């Protein structure tokens, strides 16, 4: 597996803030593991939700005719995404201080028909001075965010084959676009996986994602 430490051009979008943050943070060891095992895509587990839900989730006899499905690619149990079928955004609410657990890594693979950037990883940040929140502070739904960064997957990896692992430093990433923000108060509140806006993927293109990890 190729491991890549990236500093690529990104799309950063200011967003209006709301109130409250979810109590969905990391454990005492400082790690939050995501997509390490399959879960129900029609009824995602706690903290996971669809900001834009696709129609094709297990309703096709041929599983690979779905927008999202789980597959085993070379020993990786991965989320398979076919963005040409329909747009989607699946994400997980979090509550993570970017200075406490600043490192984001994930594994990805794309088939021969997939094009770079078919899928984006969406990171939503919120500045908050108080440190204690409960699940009832927010309720259901996508959390309010101050800033959003979109990470197109595979855009600088033309010609690569096999599984790739990308690493990012969240605090450096945030500082790049919002250098005047006090990072002590910045939390990552949303990690989303979505179709790229204004992008035309090949109908046979599949991008696979697994092992999203936030760590110290």
Image: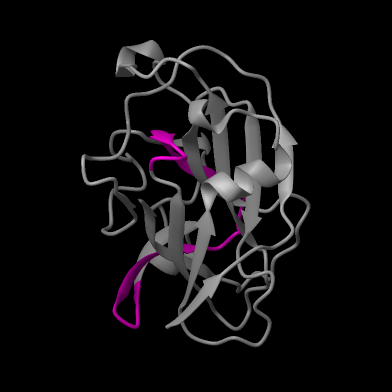
The residue segment tinted magenta is 72-100
Q: Can I make out residue 154 in this image?
A: yes
Vertical relation: 88 (above or below) 97: below
Vertical relation: 4 (above or below) 162: above
Towards the viewer: 216 or 13: 216
Residue 94 colored magenta? Answer: yes
Estimate the x, y position of residue 9 in percent, counting from the top left: 74, 59
Instruction: Tell me the quarter of the picture where residue 79 sits.
Output: bottom left
Estimate the x, y position of residue 116 in percent, counting from the top left: 67, 70
Instruction: Tell me the quarter of the picture where residue 42 sits.
Output: top left
Q: 98 left or right of 182? A: left
Q: 61 left or right of 13? A: left
Residue plotted at (34% across, 33% down): 47
Vertical relation: 149 (above or below) 165: above
Vertical relation: 9 (above or below) 89: below
Towards the viewer: 6 or 36: 6
Q: Count every numbered label the image shows and give the total.
A: 0
Estimate the x, y position of residue 200 in percent, counting from the top left: 75, 62
Q: Can I make out residue 94 in this image?
A: no
Residue plotted at (45% across, 79% down): 163
Residue plotted at (61% across, 18% down): 17
Q: In the picture, which quadrant includes the N terminus? A: bottom left
Residue 16 colored magenta? Answer: no
Residue plotted at (28% across, 51% down): 39
Towards the viewer: 54 or 50: 50
Estimate the x, y position of residue 141 in percent, counting from the top left: 46, 24
Residue sitting at the far left: 28
């Amino acid at each position: 597996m190729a491991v890549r430490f990236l500093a690529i051009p990104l799309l950063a979008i200011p967003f209006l803030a709301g109130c409250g943050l979810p109590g969905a943070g990391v454990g005492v060891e400082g790690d939050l593991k995501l997509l390490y095992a399959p879960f129900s895509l029609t009824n995602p587990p706690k903290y996971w939700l669809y900001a834009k839900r696709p129609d094709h989730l297990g309703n096709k006899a041929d599983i690979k005719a779905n927008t999202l499905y789980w597959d085993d690619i070379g020993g990786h149990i991965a989320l398979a995404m076919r963005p040409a079928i329909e747009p989607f955004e699946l994400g997980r609410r979090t509550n993570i201080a970017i200075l406490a657990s600043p490192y984001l890594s994930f594994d990805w693979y794309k088939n021969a028909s997939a094009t770079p950037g078919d899928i984006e990883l969406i990171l939503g940040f919120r500045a908050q001075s108080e440190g204690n929140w409960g699940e009832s502070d927010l309720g259901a739904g996508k959390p309010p965010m101050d800033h959003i960064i979109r990470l197109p997957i595979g855009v600088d990896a033309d010609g690569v084959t096999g599984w790739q692992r990308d690493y990012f430093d969240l605090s450096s990433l945030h500082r790049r676009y919002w250098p005047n923000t006090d990072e002590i108060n910045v939390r990552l509140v949303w990690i989303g996986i979505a179709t790229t806006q204004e992008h035309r993927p090949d109908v046979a293109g599949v991008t696979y994602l697994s092992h999203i990890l936030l760590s110290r």
